[in-house]
Amino acid sequence: MILHRPIVLAGLAVALTLSACGGAPKTPASTPTAAPPAAPLTVVHQPSGSPIVEMRFVFRAGSAYDPPGQAGAAWLLGHLMAQGGTEALTYPALLATLHPWAASIDVQVDRELLTFVARVHRDHVDRFYPIVRDVLLRPRLGAEDFQRLKTQALTRLTQQVRTSDDEALAKLVLEATLFEGTPYAHPALGTEAGLSGLTLEALKAHRRRALARDRLTVGLGGAADAALVERVRADLAALPAVADLPATVPPPPPDAQRLIVVDQPNAGATAMALGHTLPVTRADPDYPALALAASYFGQHRQFHGVLFQQVREKRGLNYGTYAYAEAFRQEGWERLALTNIPRRHQFWSLWVRPVPHEDRHFTLRLVTWLFRALHDQGVPAADVAAVRDFLTGYVWLERQTDQRRLGDAIDDRFYGLNQPAAERLTLALATLDAPAVAEVIARRLRPDALTVVVVTKDAQAFADAVLADAPSPKTYASPKPPEVTDLDAKVAPLPLGFRPEQVRVVPAAELFAK
């Protein structure tokens, strides 16, 4: 079984309630009340010549819909279902059954979606599918498995998230800050208080409220045939018709310039994340220009980005620095993004991989200077053409497998797209020119309202240095060309402009407690 690493953020869930309007005339006693129509099951069927049957069961019941005070309910429910066995099979027995078939049942949890992913060779699907069905409809939900997974989540939160992955920590605190006060702010994994207070009965109650047909999209691909589609439709009719969950998630608060310095006493280097909210999804006409800008500025794990070239290649400050026009979670060890992590509310972000502590102030200034230059100058015409060609091929590289195509098709439905996002992006890129890209960048990107998160040791000293705004000149062990040293001379005294009320120092040990 593959356990996908969840995104983990800080904050508290916000409860949303729905109220019904009164005053409707009562139904006469002699007239039976009609039952609400059954919600039709949404199925995306994408058969191919592959021998592998791909299945995705995607519920719009992610961490943003955790009940108040139960941050982590979606994560724990999904993992208890996928890694706790069924009424017929204990979890060890389930694993032993799947192993000879090279089959898998995995789970991933993000803000909007709780996704179960199942794969098997077509020769074994008749025996495998009933197990998948039981994971969804008849999970064991045993007390011992519940305690095992709850302990695992708390251990990951307190001993990994807080202490051993400063890069992830910076990004998580960024999201928590950008979406503070909304259901997007609290962790998918859960807060310490939320996980500690969760009971098995509360989790069972959340399952009854959350997992319903109106919140479910089923994806079947590869060797999945029409007979399997009808079998799934018939079986999942047993789910409740309508979920008892909020219909929508409220938008984030307004952006503001701020600096959050996380004090990590044992940090070996300084990690950073910068960003602001971005009211643009893949369905927005501005998305293609922003996708091109992000690729030009810092495509994930690619070499051509401005940030990569300036921070790593020319100055050797870190392993890489990247830019994103939407929420991004890497798929395993690949450079591609996971599918089925769409968001109603998006954000622009920059990921600065750890730099030496002595270079942290200069690096923050350099990245800030480059971002302001992107905003003010846009993308040069020659680079627009080059990045447009790169992205036109890259978006189809992302769709090479049945599994990814199926996930993308489900995400397209989430965004209400009648045309695949990859096709929309390809067509839009073909008409983009430098003035059009520059106009969108100037209108959508906000260097004046940037949240900066820095995870470092001696945090107060760094915060004081930023507030003092004294120059931070960069020196090198070997000579650098004039193009590097000339830019360094401009960057070193760059005013970052933070005021004391915009700066907070937060001990890492206190994050995600409530």
Image (tube, rainbow, N blue to C red):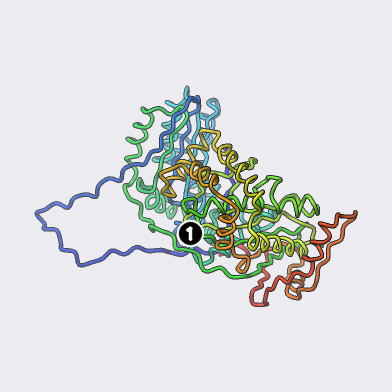
Q: Is residue 53 above or below residue 163?
A: above
Q: Residue furthest left?
A: 30
Quarter of the picture holding the C terminus: bottom right
The image quarter containing residue 462 is bottom right
Q: Is residue 197 visible?
A: no
Instruction: Write down the quadrant of residue 488 in the picture.
Output: bottom right
Q: Residue furthest top?
A: 123
Q: Is residue 239 above or below residue 234?
A: below
Residue 384 in percent (x, y) is at: 63, 49
* Nearer the observer, 268 or 221: 221
Q: Position of 205 compared to 197: left or right?
A: left
Quarter of the image for residue 290 reads bottom right
Q: Which residue is mark 1?
A: 70
Residue at figure coordinates x 63%, y 40% from the top left: 334
User: Can residue 17 be seen?
Assistant: yes
Q: Nearer the viewer, residue 179 or 88?
A: 179
In the rendered structure, which amino acid carries the disc numbered 1? Gln
Which quarter of the image is occupied by the N terminus? top right
- Residue at 60% in and 40% down: 394
Q: Residue at x 69, y 57 (%)?
A: 163
Please provide percent x and percent y for residue 222: 47, 29
Task: Name the foreground residue: 265 vs 201.
Answer: 265
Furthest toward the right, the residue is 478
Q: Residues within 10 Å of mark 1 (few under 14, many from 20)?
A: many
Residue 110 placement (x, y as % from top left): 52, 51
Count of numbered marks: 1
Lateral position of residue 506 relative to residue 416, left or right? right
> What residue appears at the point 50 percent right and 27 percent down from the top-left corner?
52
Q: Secondary structure at mark 1?
A: loop
On the image, the x and y values in percent for residue 224 come to 43, 29
Q: Is residue 362 above or below residue 168?
A: below
